[in-house]
Image (cartoon, grey):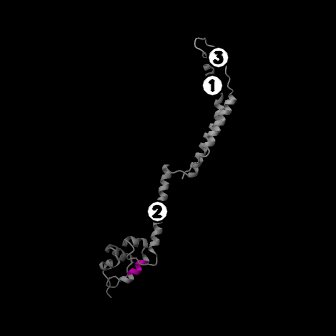
């Protein structure tokens, strides 16, 4: 029985002659005694023995593919896997470079920094109220010691006393109002 030559079978299945020669050496083709190729038998054997992804790449598309597996779903799954692996590698690289940080860790850091800032503001009136009271009292005394009318000698200034506790309460009220306004801010990291 006369079969096809390598060139004829190459044109028949849409593969290069070199691919046909490799398939013959690998035993994926059915060959008659006169070394011609049995097209129907070779098509069936190639479909069973060849990876659908490899066969699809070698044919350049869906043409020439025959087999029990749905090649489009296989190709989609293979593509999805490749994309996932590429994204995973990209994330690993970004993590190593330090450009990618853990979201929970970043949120905890922002919360901790905001709490430290708030605590600093809450304790600031107690720390600075006595100094501010002394500075304000000194400034008031200095201004009250000026002459009231021109040509009259300067009268000595009267001592001014500003209670540090009162100044502290007033400052705390204003600081708490400011912090209450800032409490509505929310950090959204994505």
What residue do we see at 46% from left, 75% from top? Answer: 70
Neighbourhood count class around disc 3 (C-alpha, 10 Å): few under 14, some 14–19, many 20 upward: some
Labels 1 and 2 touching (C-beta < 8 A)? no
The mark that comes first in sequence, 1 or 2, is 2
Image location of residue 100, percent across then percent down: 51, 51
Mark 1 highlights which residue? 136
Mark 2 highlights which residue? 83
Secondary structure character of the magenta stretch overall = helix
* Bounds of the magenta segment: 42-47
Neighbourhood count class around disc 2 (C-alpha, 10 Å): few under 14, some 14–19, many 20 upward: few
- Element under label 3? loop
Q: In this view, does 148 lie above or below 131?
A: above
| Marker disc for residue 157 | 3
Total marks in image: 3
- Element under label 2? helix
Viewer can see residue 43: yes
Which of labels 1 and 3 is toward the front?
Answer: 3
Whole-angstrom CA distance, mark 2 to mark 3, is 82 Å
Image location of residue 175, percent across then percent down: 63, 37
Labels 1 and 3 touching (C-beta < 8 A)? no
What residue do we see at 48% from left, 57% from top? Answer: 89
- Element under label 1? helix
Image quadrant occupied by the N terminus: bottom left
Whole-angstrom CA distance, mark 1 to mark 3, is 14 Å
Residue extending furthest toward the bottom: 1
């Amino acid at each position: 029985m006369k079969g096809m030559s390598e060139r004829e079978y190459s044109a028949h299945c849409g593969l290069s002659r070199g691919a046909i020669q490799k398939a013959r050496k690998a035993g994926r083709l059915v060959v008659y005694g006169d070394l011609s190729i049995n097209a129907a038998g070779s098509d069936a054997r190639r479909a069973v023995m060849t990876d659908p992804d490899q066969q699809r790449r070698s044919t350049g598309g869906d043409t020439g593919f025959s087999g029990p597996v749905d090649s489009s779903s296989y190709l989609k799954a293979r593509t999805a896997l490749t994309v996932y692996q590429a994204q995973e590698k990209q994330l690993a690289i970004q993590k190593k470079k330090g450009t990618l940080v853990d979201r929970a860790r970043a949120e905890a850091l922002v919360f901790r920094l905001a709490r430290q800032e708030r605590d600093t503001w809450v304790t600031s009136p107690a720390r600075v109220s006595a100094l501010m009271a002394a500075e304000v009292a000194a400034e008031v005394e200095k201004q009250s010691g000026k002459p009231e009318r021109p040509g009259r000698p300067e009268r000595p200034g009267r001592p001014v006393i500003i209670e540090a506790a009162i100044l502290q309460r007033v400052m705390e009220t204003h600081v708490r109002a400011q912090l209450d306004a800032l409490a509505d801010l929310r950090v959204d990291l994505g």
